[in-house]
Image: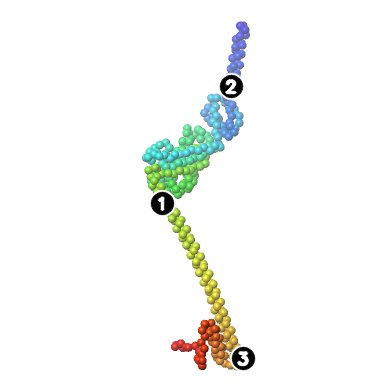
Amino acid sequence: MSGPSAPRSRRLVLRIAAGLMLTGYLMTGIFTVPANQVGIVRRCGRAVFPVRTSGLHYDLPWPWVKIDRVNLNAVHTMTLGEATDEANAFLSLASNQPTTFLTGDRNLLQLRIGVQYRISEEFLAEWLYGSTAPERRLRSLVETTVADLVSQCGVDFVHTQGLAELNNRLLIAVRTAARNQRLGCDVEQVTIDRAEPPPRVKAEFLDVSNARADLARSINEARAYAEQRLAESQADARQLVDTAIGLRGSKISAAQGSADRFQKLVQQIEQDASLGGREYAVSRNLTLNRLYLETVREILGKVKAKVVLDGPTDLSMPRGSGQ
């Protein structure tokens, strides 16, 4: 093969090799997007929309095209302000990740804040290409919002009493600010899950917390005792009312019975006077003498000793000096 065909063979081999290299180069434009992600194509550094969904795709070969793959369903977590045992709490204010915040009543608290967020599909370009460090922008936004809200609250509100309400206000404020500033993320949750005083004053804070707990316990015990005494007083009052009502009923019944008997006695006297042909006063005296004798007989029947009188005796009841 030393004739004129040798150069032609070499040129054929070079053409085949060049074709294979060109084919391989063009195949660099093939890319895949996983099922849980979306792909953003950048042609010559410029993002091309709409995004590519999961599957096999083709675009211009490298280096004209680069692919950014993003999982829009993943929940990312960011933690700010790990608690420190720094003796001088003011030193942490100058660090890159401040943990100490000043409250409205000029007290210092070390906070740990947890942030959960998703990358927004609506503002995906802003998250990827709006800044070189979007997580740092989100961190700064959260820190600024926390500092602003804490500076409006007292230490008791942040430390114990109003932490739940503060978390709700913080979530609304961060979510609104992130959307207004087009950070490119949807904030799911912002929580102050730890609020502690600086180490120097932790003992004093503990004493104050214990005093508040004792106060709350004493108030609860006093309220329980007051409720118990109130219930007992109400029960006694109801018992007295029931007894009074019962006594009133018995007195009314007895009075009505006496009135009925007296009325019947008057009617009987009138009837005896009319049937016997006597005057009413005579019948009345006879009836009263009969009742008097019946009463004396009843009394004498109940006494243990009996008195026997010999001879005539006046048994009429003595009158008072004024009658």
Name the amino acid, label 3.
Leu
Check the image and name the residue furthest to the top. 3
**Can residue 180 be seen here?**
no
Q: Are marks 1 and 3 in contact (CB under 8 Å)?
A: no
Q: Is residue 314 above or below residue 192?
A: below
Label placed on residue 275: 3
Q: Is residue 91 above or below residue 161?
A: above
Residue 167 or 160: which is nearer the viewer? 160
* Disc 1, SS: helix
Distance (Cα) linking label 2 and label 3: 148 Å
**Can residue 226 be seen here?**
yes
Label placed on residue 211: 1
Distance (Cα) linking label 1 and label 3: 94 Å
* Tag nearer the camera, 2 or 1: 1
Crowdedness of circle 1 by 10 Å Cα count: few (<14), some, many (20+)? few
Q: Position of residue 20 (x, y in %)?
A: 60, 19
Colour convention: rainbow
Q: Is residue 244 above or below residue 217?
A: below
Q: Is residue 182 left or right of residue 104?
A: right
Residue 66 or 217: which is nearer the viewer? 217
Q: Is residue 4 above or below residue 108?
A: above
* Disc 3, SS: helix
Determine which residue is flagged by label 2: 24
Residue 229 or 121: which is nearer the viewer? 229
